[in-house]
Amino acid sequence: MNEELTILQDTALTALASATDPGALAAWKGQYLGDKGAVRGLFGNIRNVPAEQKGAHGQAINLLKTTLEAAFSAREQAVKLAARNAALADETVDVSLPGRLPSLSYSHIISQTIREVTEAFVQMGFQIYEGPQVEWDLYNFEKLNIPPEHPARSMQDTFYITEKMLLRTHTSPNQIRVMEQNAPPIRVVVPGRVYRAERTDATHEFYIYQMEALVVGEHVTMADLKGTLAAFARLVFAPDAEVKFVCNYFSYVEPGAQVVVNYTTPSGKKTGWLELLGGGMVHPDVLRNGGIDPDKYTGFAFGMGIERVAMLKYDLEDIRHIYANDLRFLEQFG
């Protein structure tokens, strides 16, 4: 009978040594030490042992049970320790590796362009002025030589808030506001957002940023306008940038011109003549509406789209990329 217990013990210990995970340990315990396991079966068979051997046989079974329980406990601790060591090995941090830099914030392409454009004009002695985005029809149209019946109104698709109040369609109303608040000489630029009720496509958005410029003083001429824009193009685009004036109509300037620019890109390619902005000499009626005597003072004004400048400067083919909030696009300008 003791030989039978020895064989069972050796078999059990061999099987226990092969258990390397909690699942195998649980299966082993059920097979040998569980309620229906081999050791419990041995206790059930004691009734079949001769009376004079029952005491010794019971002691031998108890010893087997104690041995197997101790072996199981030791093996269980060993498996847990091995699992913990393996996990620690997998999660080890190599402190000699370089750290991961966090993502750094940077200005949006439009914010960068506004800063570049305003800095160029500040270098030329301009001051920065800001005006309201919700504007009166009086300032947005009428005082800019665009009365209610004027055909130029059809060029503006306007968001009206009330019959006489609207979201400004350009930054030009600030020409009047600046002239009302300041006596000549005047030299200001006005950056800001404008709104137009038009369909979005590759070159149009229903809201954009503009930069208005106004200069008023004695003996201001078209030559001053040309010199200012030539200097601006050289500062913002390239040292060899050229500007050309093409006759055009704007109700608040006379004469008016469309300005085109030609420059060499950083890659060495000539862009050809590209449309940049519109401007001209301030119309005498607009000077008069701003409280300036047109017989004594003259001035020039122009307005440019900031998105247009960015698209020219960075060779962008679609304005919608700028406001799509796609980091793959925006990070190129960080």
Image (cartoon, rainbow, N blue to C red):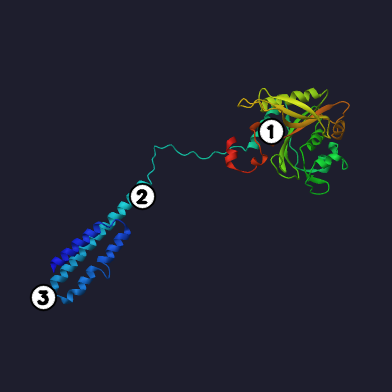
The three-letter amino acid code for the residue at tag 3 is Glu
Residue contact at pointers 2 and 1, CB within 8 angstroms:
no
The reply to whether residue 40 is visible in this rendering is: yes
The three-letter amino acid code for the residue at tag 1 is Val
Residue 87, numbered label: 2
Q: Residue at x 21, y 74 (%)?
A: 44
The reply to whether residue 334 is visible in this rendering is: no
Instruction: Classify residue 31 as left or right of residue 328.
Output: left
Pick whichever, 35 or 267, lies toward us. 267
Gap between marks 2 and 1 measured at Cα: 56 Å
Can you say whether 189 is above or below 157 in the image?
above
Task: Please identify the quarter of the rendering in which residue 142 is found.
Answer: top right
Q: Residues within 10 Å of mark 3 (few under 14, many from 20)?
A: few
Q: Position of residue 248 (x, y in %)?
A: 81, 31
Q: Which residue is mark 1?
A: 309
Residue 54, numbered label: none
The three-letter amino acid code for the residue at tag 2 is Ala
Q: Position of residue 311 (x, y in %)?
A: 67, 34
State the SS at label 2: helix
Q: Position of residue 238 (x, y in %)?
A: 66, 25
The quadrant of the picture occupied by the N terminus is bottom left
Marks counted in the figure total: 3
Residue 52, numbered label: 3
